[in-house]
Image: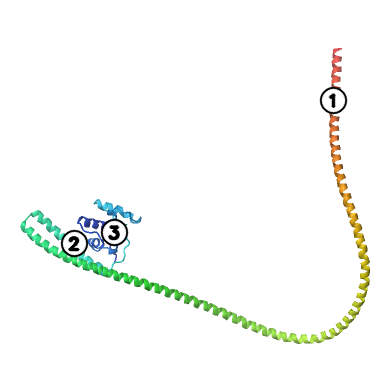
Amino acid sequence: MARIKLSAAMAFEAAKELAQEGEEVNSSTLWMRCGGIGSITTAKKWAELWQAFEEGEQVDKKLEQYRFVYETVKEGEEVDAAGDEYAEEEPIPQIVGATQDYAIQLSAIVRELVEEKTSELAEASSALVEKAQQKQGQAAHQVAASKEELNEAQKKIASLEADNQQLHNDLQTRQGQIQELEKQLKHAQQRHTTIEEHNRELSKQLGEAEERVATLEREGEASKQELKTLNAERGKLQSQLVSAQELVRECEVRANTLERDKAIASSRAGDLVHQVEREQHHAEVLETRNQELSERLTQEAAKAASAFERARQLEAQVAKFEQERLMAKEGETKSRRKVSQEKQSGG
């Protein structure tokens, strides 16, 4: 079943009434004035927030949104209670039932006292005053009894809250143990999975080993046949070895002959080495002479290039002079023609 939540507007209205009546605003009085709606934890939060607003203290940014509700209630205006609720903890049914009964009784007594006091002032009757005083005394006695019952209820609430906290702590401990057992179970499952995978790998390796053994057995049979063939061939090779040994002896004789020939060739080679050294020395002398000639040739080529460049420049100058001479001659010829023409025109 849906449970009514204790909104900021409802809590601040109750706090305002308590303050006007000179009562202390705390979790118990506020919760009782609200008829046990919501949880006492939420009532405590609203009471602390009311006191903070009353004293002008700074509050959390997320609680600052309720300042508008507080100011509206203080000004006596109505507040839209939608969206001004704390997230509620689940209440303890025994506490809610007992406290609601006490709250209803206390509210009825206070309401009766207010009505009787108003009637007494209106009629100004001594008899009614006396009767009202008697009722007031009875009411005071009932209020005292109710306060005592309220104190007992608050003690029960505190005891139940302590039990609830202990249950909460036990639950957290159990949850921690459950989590640890879950970790151990997960580890065991992983270990089991690893062992199964290892067993599958070993089975696979065993199958491969059996196949390898079968292959080696087949290869062993083939090797036996090959050994028989090799033994047969060894006899042939032994006879061939004898022939080879005879051939080696013949080769040794030939080698001795070649050694003698080599000694003779070495003697001749010494003479050839001396001749080669003389030829190398002569070649080095020629190389030096050739290098000197190359250097001189390079120098002469540089001189020739310089002379060629100078000759080219002189040719350019001569051509320029020749062109200037021709132009001067042509100018002179034109001048003479012009003078001749002027003379003819004058004659």
Q: Position of residue 201 (x, y in %)?
A: 57, 78
Please say whether residue 184 is visible from this viewpoint. yes
Q: Residue at x 37, y 72 (%)?
A: 173
Does residue 97 appear anywhere in the picture?
A: no
Residue holding disc 3: 48
Judging depth in this view, the residue of 264 and 94 nearest the camera is 264
Q: What amino acid is labelled 2 in the image? A: Ser
The quarter holding residue 132 reads bottom left
Viewer-side residue, 37 vs 110: 110
| CA neighbours of label 3 inside 10 A, class few (<14), some (14 to 19), many (20+) | some
Q: Residue tagged by mark 2?
A: 107
User: Do the residues bearing badges 2 and 3 touch, measured as CB atoms within 8 Å?
Assistant: no
Q: Nearer the viewer, residue 208 or 61?
A: 61
Question: Does 195 sit left or right of 230 as displayed?
Answer: left
Rendered view: 22 above or below 330: below
Mark 1–mark 2 distance (CA, rounded to whole Å): 144 Å
Percent x, y of residue 270: 92, 67
Q: Earlier in the sequence, mark 1 or mark 2?
A: 2
The reply, left or right, for residue 227 in relation to residue 178 is right
- Between marks 3 and 1 in the image, the one whose residue lies nearer the viewer: 3
Helix, strand or loop under label 1: helix
Is 140 on the left-hand or right-hand side of 35? left
Residue beneath the point at 85% across and 22% down = 332
**Residue type (three-letter) at the residue carrying disc 1:** Ala
Tag 3's secondary structure? helix
Amino acid type at image mark 3: Glu
Residue at numbered disc 1: 328
> Which quarter of the rendered picture does the C terminus lie within?
top right
